């Protein structure tokens, strides 16, 4: 379970969920590589449209990138 309040998140294990995903899907979501809707289309996330919308708001941000200047 992920609780988010005042810009801080806290994760705890739980048997009930509103959004179901494994750690690999969470990593893609957290990194901004995939959106909740894209992960749902791939079958990597389960949840209602409302929960997908909430996850999109929580994990909103720019797409990942890295300058090619080393």
Image (cartoon, rainbow, N blue to C red):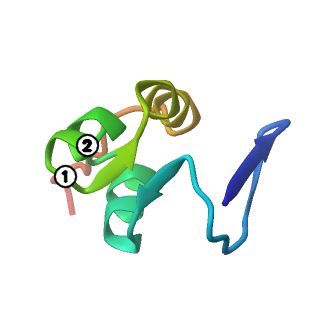
The residue at the point 44 percent across, 57 percent down is 20
Q: Tell me if 6 is positioned left or right of 38 in this view.
A: right
Quadrant position of residue 2: bottom right
Gap in Å between the C-alphas at discs 1 and 2? 5 Å
Which residue reaches farthest right? 6
Tag 1 secondary structure: loop
Between 14 and 58, the one nearer to me in the picture:
14
For the N terminus, the image quarter is bottom right
Instruction: Note whether 6 is above or below 23 in the view shown.
Output: above
The residue at the point 35 percent across, 39 percent down is 36
Q: Could you tell me if the residues under marks 1 and 2 are in contact, i.e. CB atoms within 8 Å?
A: yes
Q: Tell me if 43 is positioned left or right of 62 in this view.
A: left
Quadrant position of residue 44: bottom left
Q: Which residue is mark 1?
A: 43
Callout 2 crowding tier (Cα within 10 Å): few <14, some 14–19, many ≥20: some
Quadrant position of residue 22: bottom left
For the C terminus, the image quarter is bottom left
Q: Which residue is mark 2?
A: 40
The residue at the point 36 percent across, 49 percent down is 46
Tag 2 secondary structure: helix
Question: Residue 57, how many percent across, how many down?
Answer: 54, 27
The residue at the point 25 percent across, 43 percent down is 40
Instruction: Note whether 3 is above or below 53 in the view shown.
Output: below
Question: Residue 31, how many percent across, how many down?
Answer: 39, 54
């Amino acid at each position: 379970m992920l609780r988010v309040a005042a810009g801080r998140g806290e994760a705890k294990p739980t048997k009930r969920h509103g959004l179901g995903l494994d750690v690999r899907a969470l990593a893609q979501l957290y990194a901004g590589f995939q959106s909740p809707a894209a992960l749902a289309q791939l079958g990597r996330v389960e949840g209602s449209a409302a929960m997908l919308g909430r996850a999109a708001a929580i994990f909103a941000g720019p797409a990942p990138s890295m300058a090619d200047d080393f």
